[in-house]
Image: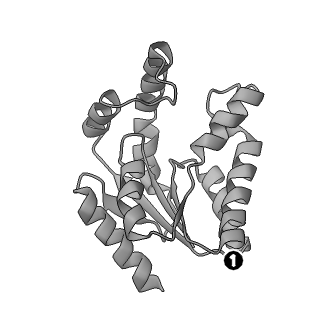
Amino acid sequence: MIVWVNGAFGSGKTSLVEELRPRMPEALVYDPEWVGYLLREIVEVPTGNFQDLPLWRQQVADLAVRLVQEYRRPVLVPMTLVNPGYLEEIFGVLERAGITLHHFFLKVAPDVLARRIDGRNVTPDGDPEREARARRWCKAQIEPCTAALDTLPGDTVILDGELPLRELADEVLTRVRAAG
């Protein structure tokens, strides 16, 4: 089983997964952003968005499948994924592999997202110049992420990302357990 926590940058995906982790101690946490960081060190990313690399999408899906198959444990995935084609591509691989997918999207007001992005480090190394570029990029994604609500798969569970983390985690666990 995979619990994919989706939403704009600053919506609380990683924080929600951190809240879920002690409640699902058997779960693995898999952040596909690290696959992007690795690829960015190896190849050029012409668009600046590693999700545009077919290899990123393939590796993200394949590693998720292998984690579930090899370790037989739930996998928690905090990752923004709003391009309908990319979402279909990755989720299609999971479906063909027979993996149960629970897809949650954290909906947060754009002004709240901008404040949250300004209040945190968004790059792994904390380099000030890279931080500024990354913040600008994250903020530029707010509108496309908000607009993506209309294109998400029908079984996506939309959550109010402005609720306390404890309540959000309760909701996720209730829905995952109810689905069996």
| On-image quarter of the N terminus | bottom right
Instruction: Using the rendered view, name the quadrant where residue 171 is placed.
Output: bottom left
State left or right for residue 27 relative to residue 119.
Answer: right
Image height of 2 relative to 82, above or below: below
Image height of 147 relative to 92, above or below: above
Tell me which residue sits at (50%, 18%) in the image.
130
Residue toward you, 48 or 121: 121
Is any part of residue 92 visible from this angle?
no
State left or right for residue 40 relative to residue 80.
Answer: right
Q: Which residue is mark 1?
A: 98
Q: State the image coordinates of residue 109 (x, y, percent, origin top left).
A: 27, 44
Tell me which residue sits at (43%, 77%) in the image.
176
Total residue callouts: 1
Tell me which residue sits at (50%, 47%) in the image.
80
Is any part of residue 169 visible from this angle?
yes
Dot 1, crowdedness within 10 Å: few (<14), some or many (≥20)? few
Q: State the image coordinates of residue 177 (x, y, percent, origin top left).
A: 42, 82
Instruction: Using the rendered view, name the quadrant where residue 150 is placed.
Output: bottom left
Instruction: Using the rendered view, name the quadrant where residue 96 is placed.
Output: bottom right
Q: State the image coordinates of residue 20 (x, y, percent, origin top left).
A: 38, 63
Residue type of the residue flagged with mark 1: Gly
